[in-house]
Amino acid sequence: PRAAAMAGDGAVPKAVESALRSLGFSAQEARSGLESVDWQSSPSTQDALATALKALGRK
């Protein structure tokens, strides 16, 4: 995904996508959540997941 290309090796976006999928989000929803993260700020997995969840309406 485009988000992974913006985050170095892509490990954090992959981990966040996996976590979102494990929480029951569809692949499309997970991608939408990933797109809400500011990857240029190099967020931690936890911060990126929190941002994605907020964007998807779950806190």
Image (cartoon, helix red, strand yellow):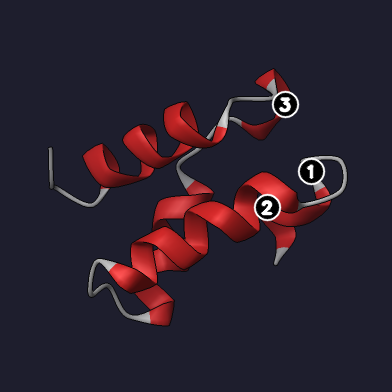
Quadrant of the snapshot with the N terminus: bottom right
Tag 1–tag 3 contact (CB < 8 Å): yes
Tell me whether circle 3 and circle 2 mark residues in contact (CB < 8 Å). Answer: no
In terms of secondary structure, where does tag 3 sit? helix
Q: Which mark, residue 40? A: 3
Q: Which residue is mark 1?
A: 6
Q: Amino acid type of disc 1?
A: Met
Q: Relative to 12, is 59 on the left or the right?
A: left
Closer to the chain start, of discs 3 and 2, is: 2
**Reading the chain from its start, which is encountered first: label 1 or label 3?**
1
- Judging depth in this view, the residue of 14 and 3 nearest the camera is 14
Q: 10 left or right of 27?
A: right
Location of residue 2 in the rendering, given as x and y in whole percent from the top left corner: 72, 59
Where residue 20 sits: x, y (%)? Answer: 36, 62
Q: Name which residue type carries label 2.
A: Ala
* Element marked by disc 2: helix
Instruction: Say the numbered circle drawn on residue 3.
Output: 2
- Residue at 86% x, 40% y is 8
State how far apart marks 1 and 3 are (Cα): 7 Å
Quadrant that contains the C terminus: top left
Q: Rounded to the nearest whole Å, what is the CA distance between mark 3 and mark 2?
A: 10 Å
The residue drawn where x is 68% and y is 52% is 3
- Mark 3, Cα crowd under 10 Å, few <14 / some 14-19 / many 20+, is few
Identify the mark at residue 24; answer none if there is no mark: none
Q: Residue at x 23, y 38 (%)?
A: 54
Local secondary structure at mark 1: loop
Residue visible at 33% across and 71% down in the picture: 22
Q: Quadrant of residue 38?
A: top right
